[in-house]
Image (cartoon, rainbow, N blue to C red):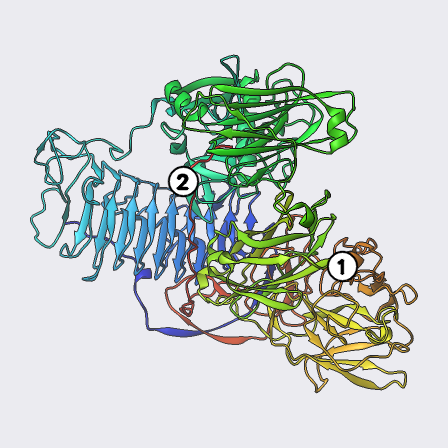
Amino acid sequence: MKRIKYNKKNQIQNKAKKIIAPVLIFLLIGLPLKPLLANGEEIVNIGVNTVLTADINGRVVITANNITLDCNGYKIIGTSDGDEDEDGYNDGNGIYLYSKNNVTVKNCVIENFETGIYSISSSSNTYKENNILSNLYEGIFLSNSNNNSFIGNDISNNRYNGIQLSDSNYNNINNNKISYNSFNSLGVGISLFNSSHNNIFENNISKNEYGVNILYVDAYSKNLVYHNNFIGNTFQAWIYPNDRNDLFDNGYPDGGNYWSDYAGIDLQKGENQNENGSDGIGDIPYIFPEGNTDPYIGGQDKYPFMEENGWQEDVPEWRKDIQPGDILYDAGALPIKRRGIILYSIGHIGMYVGDVEIDGEIFHNQVVEANKKTEDGRRGVQYRNIETWDYPKRKLVYLLRVNASNEKKENVVTFTKEQIKKPYKFPWLTKDPDPDSPSWYCSELVWAAYYNQRINLEEGEEPFDNPVAPSEIYNDTDTLVVADHLNYLAYYAEEYLKSIIFQIFSPVNVEITNPDGNVISKEIDDIDDAVYIIDDLDDDGDYEDTIGIETRKMGTYTIRITPKVGADPDDTYTLKVIAGDAEIIWADLSIGELIESGFKIFTIYSNPNDINGEPVDKNTPQCFHDEETSSENLFSAGILDFSLNSPRNFFPTTTPTTTSSRDINIANDGNLGFQYTVTTTNATDTLCEHLNLTANLDGNPVYEGPLASFNYNAGEFSNSTNAWQFTATLNDNDPALQNQTCNFDFVFDGSQISGAGFSDEEIISNTVDSGSWAITPPTPPEPGDVIINEVMWMGSKDIDKPVKDGPKDQWVELKNVSGRDLHLKGLYLTYKSNASNENKLAEINNNRLVRAGEYYLITYYTKDNSAINVSPDQNIDKNFDYGKFQIKLYTDNTKLVLIDTAGDGIGEPAKGDKNNFYSMERNDIPGNGTDYNNWHSCLDPNSTALYWDTGRTEQGTPGYYNLSANDPSADDYQDDTLPVIASEPRGERGNPNGDAMDDAIDDGIASVAPLPRNDTFEVVADEAIRDEEEIILEEDETEIIMEGDVMIGEPEEVDEPKNLESGNDDDLNNLNEQPNE
């Protein structure tokens, strides 16, 4: 029996020695790189998201959680020739992680080190698409590291082990190529030592001394090895001891692995392989290792495959040659027929992009498409498996290929993936190729992806103010049909005959109400399987408004026609309805009569069960059905129209200890009385299911319960406005809910009070974000962490006495600029009176968590008694003088540690318009608050409507980012300019996943300029050397010591650092079913 070599890194040494070493401190913002070691080799400390633009001749140390290192194909190279030095090592580790979680390392070439990637006590990390080769010991070595993923790596020509897991559990190793890891009859493709519950699947493991070995696992071990190709390994697999629960197959019919030396046959099938007929699985188990007689060694694969990748399912013929960038066109959706012939269909379209990566997980064979709504209630740009385009889910599918270079197609695919999760655009009235477009419809997304590569896929190449239809992409000369799957019989029976189409030929507007009362128009999108498009779909030179509904319902459809602005009274219009094989047409109707009456109503009765029957014309010109007698008739013609006004979305983030809120005002813009309901819809995200909602109407609580269940009948609208305040609360402290998003809609549905008739529906979309609470605990503020950002020192205009006392209506806004979450409770504010005394203004008494980049608003009056339309965080009972204006912020009431100052204390404030009552806003963050030039007056008129009561003329942004046009940063501090660089930008407009530096940087040792907005990084080195200090270091560990983001040169031996809590995996639910456009 051959023995497996384990080097001394796998042992625990108790011997320790003292080292006195100078400390060289580096603050890494990014690249380029600086040499650190005496031999000229580089050690690169990476603590932010980084993309390489050049090779690294040296080692990389990961110093932060939640980051990505993308080598972009560049190399990380050791300087050795591969031979061991006198201590038995060569050049250490290519990439080193210690207690780092949620890190992604991808697209790297790592060669000529002792170990390519070395991970200790680091979990929930992803290593993918790396080439790890020619290292002295392992390609990848993990110790005490759990829940990691290894995907799509090429690990070859390492002397001993390709991947070695030691005391590491619940890891996934899949889709890797692991080969030629062998030296002097040693070397293992994948080695598990005292490691359990790991999954090894869909790998190619070839030409190693040992393919896979599993050694010294405990009695509860359950490693699963299946769907791998074992080819030409000297010993394909090895288990010791073999009386554990480790499996080399996943049962029947899922099967086991392919073994190149398997000598069995396949004549039978079934779980016991005793039924007639082959199934691609060998009839007898594969026993390993070959020729073994030791009863404690080895194992078996009960269901070995006869061919490589024998577990892969057959691919339908129509898509065997599909390539990323190919277009999928479903011609069967909503066909348009004339004289018994189908002229065209609106169709649906998507793009095949291959693999899609979401939160570190790879999804194969994906199509990206913009869907109006899916069966599970979701909508927007989504990724779906190509199987959703197979028959019978879709019945008339063409596979289109664009005549373009591979480089352009790669750019097209990248563009398309970047649009995933954007909303669906409604209606289809225009097209826009802007990559930053906030929403897409299906054909616009495909067209824009190629348009940005200077390929216009629209037949006729119409201007941007015309939409692009899927059929126009299909008909364009740049697309070629390379395959299809067509089932016309199913298409006619199940697609065409069940639809209903409305077409208007004229300068009029149309609104359709289905038998359930749902509406489709240019402004309202209530019918899930309906589309509204304006285009010349039949190529006759005229544009039609076409509304298509995929599945018609039994009952009455109401068609409301109104004239467009500027319509010619002498013109005419035509309405056509197509239901199954039948048509009904109202032709050449007078526009003049329509203008005079204001509208016209048509009704159609539809019977889906009688698909060939003529629709019944129940056209009645009246608009309303009055239910009252003449003496009680309360109806008079008019307009039912209301609007919603909301200055901002839910703010700030929501955690188990903080809430976020949103104010929405509803105003009657018409002259008809109405009643309305408010309902939550589309609240299907995971976070939505855990949120509670509190709703107040005009200050009175009306609902408290699950957010997704909110449904309230507000009754008759009797005021000029209704003021709603919604507050979202998260009671569940499960760490998996951190940094999640809940997207949902509030639907305000109004209907006429007296008589059936007009209705109006307004939808406002909402986003509630959750913050972090289990990763980085909040810390108390320090000088420079919080600033006085805005002051309304002159109060408000004195126009509301005795309700409001204008000069006393003062407020002060604080802002957290630290880049981390803070508790402000206990902070102490003072003001300077005309007598030059420093007086107490306020002591912060609110214990809410103030997130990075968030605000804290202190006012004299409550919201009801103040001129501002914003709820403060704290009310105080004092006003401040501004004759010698100065406000100071201290850490506490001892006033020993000053955090920030506003004003110079000499005269009136530097800025802020006293006559017009405009607030004083800060320019630079943090800057010098006593400097006259560091302030400006709020000059943005939009702030009045957003943050002040109706009828006010003051300007200012209490509790929100500055809007002033003369603010140098245009829309306030962006959270990418920190007083000390600690991480990537974070906060309301920064990266929500950025983490602060582990330790504060000592004064006098390192300081840096603010991080620029672009992606240019640099390394800043300070020559200051700390005092010599004794460091106890253990023997035979890594060559690099990390202390937060501080790097300590290269000691001979280091301590075993303490273990950190591992991160948490996020659940990701892919969407599996397709809708029609």
Instruction: Judge the density around disc 1: few (<14), some (14-19), many (≥20) Cα neighbours within 10 Å.
Output: many
Give the secondary structure at mark 2.
Answer: loop
Visible in this render: residue 952?
yes
The residue lying toward the viewer, choosing from 719 and 442, is 719
Q: Nearer the viewer, mark 2 or mark 1?
A: 2
Residue at left 90%, top 83%? 834
Mark 2, residue position:
1072
Is residue 749 shown left or right of residue 383? right
Is residue 74 shown left or right of residue 830? left
The residue lying toward the viewer, choosing from 687 and 718, is 718
Residue 814 image label: none
Of the numbered discs 2 and 1, the one sitting upstream in the chain is 1
Q: Position of residue 690 (x, y in %)?
A: 47, 61
Q: Amino acid at mark 1?
A: Asn
Mark 1, residue position:
962
The residue lying toward the viewer, choosing from 157 and 755, is 755
Q: Are marks 2 and 1 in contact (CB under 8 Å)?
A: no
Q: Position of residue 742 (x, y in %)?
A: 53, 54
Res 969 quadrant in image: bottom right
Is residue 277 shown left or right of residue 597? left
Q: Position of residue 910 (x, y in %)?
A: 88, 68
Report how far apart the C-alphas of labels 2 and 1 lie in the structure. Answer: 43 Å
The residue lying toward the viewer, choosing from 856 and 571, is 571
Give the secondary structure at mark 1.
Answer: loop
